[in-house]
Amino acid sequence: MSVNVQIKKKLDSFLLDISFQSDSRRIGILGASGCGKSMTLKSIAGIEIPDEGRIEVEGRVLFDREQKINLKPQKRNVGYLFQNYALFPTMTVEKNIAAGLQGSRGENEKRVREMIEKFQLSGLEKRLPGQLSGGQQQRAALARIMAYEPDVILLDEPFSALDMYLKDQLQQELLQMLEDYEGTVIMVSHNRDEVYRFSEELLIIEEGRNIVSGRTKELFQNPVKREAARLTGCKNFSRVHRVDAYTAEALDWGIAIHTKRQIPEDTKWFGYRAHDFVPVWGERKENMLKVAVKSSAVLPFERNYYLWPEKMPEHASGDSESTVESQLSGGYAECRQEVCWFVQREKLEELDKRGLPDYLKLREEKLLFLE
């Protein structure tokens, strides 16, 4: 399976400039609202026409501006699952499923029966979309797409309008329904958990451009870019003043960071996920942040603390660890960013028993070096 998309499209002041190639069967596109995710899908489907570029799926050229190739949507063999499922409201489930089929009447009826059984819609054949639950509508919409065996299925934020319980249930159902589909599936979302659960390969888009791409789990472990880290759920960022290959000041946290691995020269930010801090009671050692609570929030399954950062000089001179440590005692500049520490339920018992820790340790293996 392969997808190759190299396109540009200008819309008013917005420029979509996307370039990616993948052989993965499950591709996720992650980005904030308005970044160009849906426009990318619509370009692949033929609903939007790029100003320039090329789109190729499974060796078939769907669009090539230079070669003047632009297949109509119905000729592209692409299935598009819209946010609202886009079922025909005045057609029954079975007629919706049959809508895209072009075989004989007998062939179409057989295919519709197969899809109704596969997607657990038995007994609902004669119902209209308005008489179905959200999950049933999703299954009917997917059955309609799968009936004509597309080369690629595009999922456009399919869970965005659902409550948390239904969302989790339908995500699992969708994964199961797509298990034996051998084509490529591309899902766009602004929800990092959906993308992590669904995709093998991930493309992260910011303001119309893909800023990083790669294997999903690897990108969550090392997002490379600050915006990519933010979109994958990182809450804590600090500007970096690199003193040497193994020492840097975290300017917005107010501490010096010492590492065993080299800090790349192009590191502009440190990132640290809110769940990865280690509480420490007692003596302060290196790579620790003093706990000074600004505010807190009690949630059903965790407790969130928002901490004051320590203070830090704007610029440091010298290149030794001792110099950096000595600078922490004077010449401070105000830091403007609070530090988020999220404590999950299984760790709260120790916290309630011992009280708040004196410090939070940043584990080096969890520290993100970001451009």
Image (cartoon, rainbow, N blue to C red):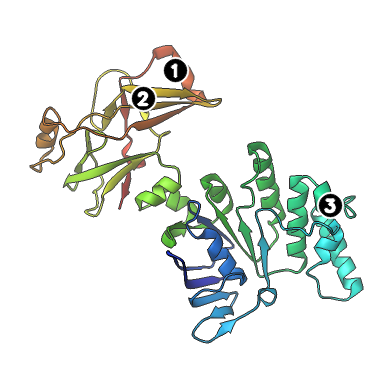
**Label 2 or label 1, whichever comes before in sequence order:** 2
Three-letter code for the amino acid on which mark 3 is drawn: Leu
Q: Nearer the viewer, residue 281 or 326?
A: 326
Instruction: Name the residue carrying label 2.
Output: 279
Place of residue 118 in the rendered image (x, y in percent of width and height, measured from the top left):
80, 56
Left or right of 111, for residue 17: left
Place of residue 152 in the rendered image (x, y in percent of width and height, measured from the top left):
64, 67
- In the image, residue 147 above or below residue 306: below
Place of residue 197 in the rendered image (x, y in percent of width and height, measured from the top left):
57, 48
Instruction: Name the residue carrying label 3.
Output: 121
CA–CA distance in space, label 2 to label 1: 10 Å
Q: Quadrant of residue 59?
A: bottom right
Left or right of 283, for residue 45: right
Any part of residue 123 in sight: yes
Q: Secondary structure at mark 1?
A: helix
Q: Secondary structure at mark 2?
A: strand
Three-letter code for the amino acid on which mark 2 is drawn: Pro
